Amino acid sequence: MIPPRSVRARLTLWYSAVLAVVLISFSAISYVLLSRHIRALTDESLAGTAKEFIAAFEDPEPAGGIDRGEPMRLDFRYSNRAILVFRTDGRLLLGPAADQIPAGAQAVLGEAVRSRKSGYLTLPGGVESDGYRVFIAPFGAVGKRYAVAAIRSLQEQTETLEFASRSIWVGIPLSMLIASAGGYLLARKSLAPVMVMTRQARRIGADRLSERVAVNNPDDELGFLGTTLNSLLARLEASFSAQRRFMADASHELRTPLAILRGETDVALTRDRPASEYRQTLEVMQRTIRKLSSIVSDLFLLSRSDLGEYPVRKSRFYLDELVEKSVESFRTLAMHRQQQLTFHSQGETIVNMDEELIGRLVSNLIDNAIKYTPHGGRIEVTLQPHGDRFCLTVRDSGGGIPPDAQSRIFERFFRANRLRGANDTSPPPVGAGLGLPIASWIAGAHGGRLWLESSGENGSLFVAEIPTGIPD
Ligand code: ADP
């Protein structure tokens, strides 16, 4: 069977099916219990009648006795049952009018008495073939043995049970019909807010992410759904606007070097120039192209890392050697800026990491320390193992980062502007504001963390704590 597509219909169907099972089981159990009870009542009343009769005849004996040799009319009348008294040889001694008992019953009962049967019997017959129920009990009077049979038609009992079963057969479908209609309306009413939310959510596109679905009661399940939907929309909105900002910042970053390239070539091509001027132009172009390609490669790394696609290729290597090499590669630049660049490491540190990425993290931090520290300053790099992690610190004696900018330095394209030392005559440091976000991502991708420990007038201290990737 193909399940109905609407939840309302499915709910109603389930509800009706469960209700049907409950109603049918309940009715079946009730019917069985009722019929047992009615049978037990019939049996009890027959046994009661027989016992009353026996009590009446046993003591005292009625004048003249009951056994006068001929069957006698017995007017021990009940409206719905009759009494028959048999001798032990099966001959009827006392009995009702012939029309009060089924044809042939007398012979069957006589036979039962003769074969010393007692207790309950069911006989066929009756107006609508409902049958008869009989209770046979032996008794003694004036030294002789007899048996009394109390007989009753089962018509009344059958009628009661038929009435009960008719009520069940009419009642079940009727209550199912009413309950299903009620269930459908209830499901419709309960699911109405979902329909409203669906319509609202459908209208919300990428350009309308600031809209939210209406939540009537935030404490119920549907309210919870609405709140969850809204928080999803809020996250989407934040991520969309971050993407847009990223795109805008990235194009802005690319515009400056492209404008320089265009300007340089335009100027160079206005007229013929001596070779030295062309050389100068080419040198500017080379620097600009390097910067451009570094920005593009940073952007590529960040966008791939956002998609979770940047591969982290781990291998074993000596981290102290890598940091030392990185420090050495900055030695000339530091000397050029008359800065003191030192590296301290506590022995060998073997790690299992992406060597290229970790190298990039180290060089981004040292590059910043050199860039943002005035001439004659000091830069100290240290590496300390701490169990299954290591701690890399880069301390400089630069002017620090303004307090209000400190929380934002790990944001993409963020650059804190700060006046550098008065006697610093080098050109202002240029960066795209991507170095720290990339370094922070690298630390995170290795299960570690990079943070700014302190920054002030006396310089800044950056700390990276990362698991070595090698079990203890
Ligand atoms: P950039 O390419 O501009 O250096 P980063 O993401 O590496 O970008 O750094 C972001 C900003 O944080 C820098 O523009 C700078 O203002 C500040 N900053 C980073 N490192 C230092 C440092 N060692 N000393 C002072 N300021 C720093």
Image (cartoon, grey):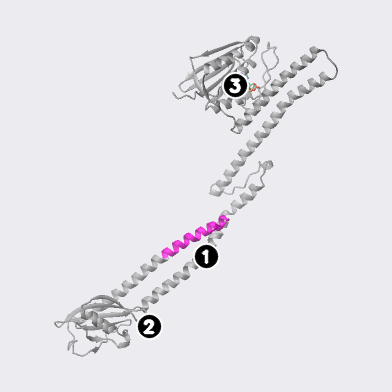
Single out the residue that lies furthest toward the left: 143
Q: Relative to 133, say whether 62 is above or below.
A: below
Q: For residue 359, what is the image quadrant?
A: top right
The yes-or-no answer for disc 1 within 8 Å of ligand 1 is no
Measured from the top left, where is residue 142 in percent x and y?
Answer: 14, 83
Q: Distance between the residues labelled 3 and 1?
A: 73 Å
Give the amino acid type for the residue marked by disc 2 in the picture: Val
Q: Which of marks 3 and 1 is in front?
A: 3
Q: Which of marks 2 and 1 is in front?
A: 2
Q: Residue at x 67, y 21 (%)?
A: 431
Whether residue 25 appears in magenta in the rendering, the answer is yes
The magenta region covers 1-26
Q: Is residue 16 left or right of residue 418?
A: left
Give the amino acid type for the residue marked by disc 3 in the picture: Arg
Q: Is residue 457 left or right of residue 70?
A: right
Q: Which mark is on residue 244?
A: none
Measured from the top left, where is residue 185 in percent x and y?
Answer: 56, 60
Q: Is any atom of residue 362 visible in this view? A: yes
Q: Relative to 84, say whether 28 is above or below.
A: above
Where does label 1 land, which residue?
178
Front one among 369 and 400: 369
Q: For residue 360, what is the image quadrant?
A: top right
Q: Is any atom of residue 53 visible in this view? A: no
Q: How far apart are marks 2 and 1 (CA)?
A: 39 Å
Measured from the top left, where is residue 224 in percent x and y?
Answer: 55, 46
Q: Relative to 406, say whether 236 is above or below.
A: below
Give the amino acid type for the residue marked by disc 1 in the picture: Ile
Of label 2 and label 3, which has the lower sequence position? 2
Residue at disc 1, secondary structure: helix
Q: Which mark is on residue 127?
A: 2
Front one among 27 and 293: 293
